[in-house]
Amino acid sequence: MTNTKETLVTAFALFSLFFGAGNLLLPPLLGYNAGEDWMWVTFGFMITAVVIPILGILAHARLQGTMYDFGKKVSPTFSTVYCIIVYLISITIPSPRTASATHEMAIHPVFGTSPLLTSGIYFALVLVFVLNRSKILNFIGKFLTPLIVIMLFGVIGIGLFTSDGLMNVSSFDAPVVSGILEGYQTFDAIGAVVVGAVVIISLNLKGLTSFEAKKEMIRKSGFIAGLGLLLIYAGLISVGSFFGSDIQIDNALSNDMQRANLLRGISIASLGAFGNKVLSMLIALACFTTAVGIVTGTADYFKGLFKGSQKAYIITGIVACCIGVLIGQLNFHAIVVIAIPALMFIYPITIILILLNVLPEKLASAKVFKAVVITTMIFSIPDFLATIGLAEAVSNLQDYIPLSTFSLGWVLPAVTVFIIMNLISNAKRTI
């Protein structure tokens, strides 16, 4: 009974650590624009926002180390650099983004306060949680997640019953691909390698030392959290599509303002004036738990890097929160724009590391790791350059790379190299 309870608490905590600003705001507009194709968009979105992140948790269950273990087969230097880059991205983009979203959609409309005051108070509270490291998993899993889930299912359930079900014509030429790329913006694959390590350390602090017991608990928790994410994402996308004829959004607005206005419109349409308050609380809670997970994961890593130094943990937590206060004053759209180039380069590498780490050892040797990761890095460069204003310079090159026009030019080369390297390894074993 205790194990079942602990598994559910861990699963709920995992769900909350994943579910932040982008996870709430992205799906409804995706469904709204997909219209009748919402199921295809959902399929694509699930690949990068649910399946790969949960595989990341399963990889953590198998490795039971830190993010460093994900890339050490490539080389120790690569893994260290990769970890530092991911954690820097995490505390400079998704973490501040949660404060920005909370301010724009939950705090400013009610209190009219400045973004500096909001982000200051927000990250002060985050730091309180981070400094109480041993209590994080229990508090989030037992108290915050149930509130988030109840409100989410309320908005989705009532929304589906109150909409007239008339959908827009899809604005996507390739809905599955659009869903895949939108899933990048959730940061969930990166979140998996960050928060998975948080869960491992949290279980250690709770006295669970058995490798097999932890593996089983993390695997079960991962599947439960993944199922929750799948249901919530599918619900939010479908609600966005079903309200296509009920809510009109201003196409002149940025995508981020459209997302905010659409979600607010759905909440008010389904729950009345009370919907505004529910949405504000939902955003604040969802964003806050994600920020706590990111800062804690970063502090855990640097604590390990400095041989278990508690001082390193505290300093990292403080620095990460200070960065959050500074960047959190930017509007949500500005932070998303900054995120795109970083995502186009680091996300493919993260996906490949996750996939290789869940494969059997005989299919993912050190040589396979090196070859596939290097190939992924090389073929991600054109997509990265295209997002920093050099699209014309790399357009001719992208014409020769399959799927590059969809910003997925790394996929086929990585798969091809993976197959070739394993064929070579099998041939050597046979000889």
Image: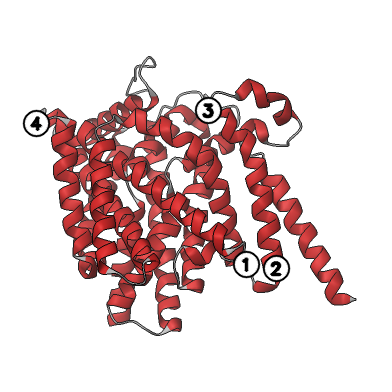
Label of residue 163 in the image: none
Amino acid type, callout 2: Leu
Q: Name the residue under label 4.
A: 111
- Marks 2/1: CA distance? 6 Å
Q: Which of marks 2 and 3 is nearer the N terminus?
A: 2
Assess whether mark 4 and mark 3 are in contact (beta carbons under 8 angstroms).
Answer: no
Assess whether mark 4 and mark 2 are in contact (beta carbons under 8 angstroms).
Answer: no
Quadrant in which the C terminus is drawn: bottom right
Closer to the eye: label 2 or 3: 3
Closer to the eye: label 3 or 4: 3
Assess whether mark 1 and mark 4 are in contact (beta carbons under 8 angstroms).
Answer: no
Q: At which x and y percent is residue 392?
A: 64, 20
Q: Earlier in the sequence, mark 3 or mark 1?
A: 1
- Marks 2/4: CA distance? 56 Å
Q: In this view, does 367 lie above or below 378?
A: below
- Name the residue: 21% across, 44% down: 284
- Marks 3/4: CA distance? 37 Å
Q: Mark 2 points at which residue?
A: 363
Label 2 neighbourhood size at 10 Å, few (<14), some (14-19), many (20+)? some
Query: Closer to the camera, 284 or 322?
Result: 322
Q: Which of marks 3 and 4 is nearer the N terminus?
A: 4
Query: Closer to the camera, 375 or 261?
Result: 375
